[in-house]
Amino acid sequence: MPLTVATWNINSVRLRQDLVAELAAKRNPDVICLQETKCPNSEFPRKSFERLGYRHIAAHGQKGYHGVAVLSKRPIETIVAREFCEKGDCRHLAVDVEGDGGRSVRIHNFYVPAGGDEPDPAINPKFAHKLDFLEELIAWSADDVSTVAPDSGALLLGDLNIAPLEDDVWSHRQLLRVVSHTPVETEGLERVRKALDWVDVVRRDVPPPEKLYTWWSYRARDWEAADKGRRLDHVWLTPGIADACTQVEVLREARGWERPSDHVPVIVRLEM
């Protein structure tokens, strides 16, 4: 049976729970991974999502900032909500999603720090935090392989807040000194990817030089006409299950929905 998984930085789950309902109505993914939920666990709108058929929910959130959650139509088991950089931020949640024949797949849902505006860790603590977060991700992958990627395979997905390729931004030259596309960030993210040979299945199926974005700034008066986007949201698979991914979709239309997030969903289909 296929497993469809969506990842989406929802930018406040309580404010935009109706958009999650719209995603469910239009694409009906089995699993929806949310980032930037901005909601403590006690106030997470579980009942709204249970009515949509997502009866299995794991949330790791805090008031006003950050936060990740997994909504699933299939049974899940929460594995860990790991803390990075000793910040107490809610930026990671790992679950096992039940598959066929007792086999499950692990999903790591991440919200990597944005990094502020100035790409200099000496004067910008937010950017320093982002670089430290990437270093911890690399160490985590190397030191705790059994937790990261069990034999049944794993996905690493979410808002990684880095557009790694030249064709993941509207202007490579103009964004080289802009946080999210600086060389130190893109090289750091590539080191994370190589730590377990994760497969970027979205770019495998939609290869460069095709431009591909998942985020458009609220600052643009007409985001669609300007089309100054960045690919900040990603889905990676461990090599053993990468071939099971038969379809990817970036749901660009969601940026034009009413009261939208500045990110759009990325959806993958796995023939598990």
Image (tube, helix red, strand yellow):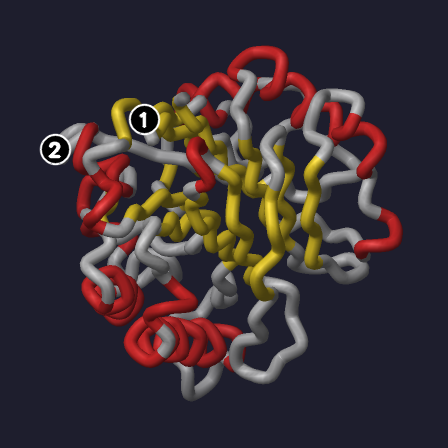
Residue beneath disc 1: 271
Furthest residue in direction left, as rendered = 209
The residue sitting at 25% across, 60% down in the picture is 193
Across and down, in percent, residue 25 comes to: 62, 12
Could you tell me which quadrant the C terminus lies in?
A: top left
Across and down, in percent, residue 122 comes to: 42, 88
Q: CA distance from mark 1 to mark 2?
A: 27 Å
The answer to whether 201 is drawn above or below residue 137 in the figure is: above
Q: Nearer the viewer, residue 199 or 80?
A: 80
Q: Earlier in the sequence, mark 1 or mark 2?
A: 2
- Total number of numbered discs in the rendering: 2
Across and down, in percent, residue 260 comes to: 63, 28
The residue sitting at 65% across, 43% down in the picture is 11
Q: Amino acid at mark 1?
A: Glu
Residue beneath disc 2: 209
Label 1 sits on a secondary structure element that is strand
The answer to whether 66 is drawn above or below residue 224 in the figure is: below
Furthest residue in direction top, as rendered = 26
Across and down, in percent, residue 35 comes to: 59, 48
Label 2 sits on a secondary structure element that is loop
Q: Residues within 10 Å of mark 2 (few under 14, many from 20)?
A: few
Left or right of 211: which side holds 217?
Answer: right
Which quarter of the picture shows residue 189? bottom left
Left or right of 197: which side holds 225?
Answer: right
The residue sitting at 42% across, 55% down in the picture is 160
The residue sitting at 76% across, 61% down in the picture is 62
Q: Amino acid at mark 2?
A: Pro
Could you tell me which quadrant the N terminus lies in?
A: top left
Camera sees residue 187:
no
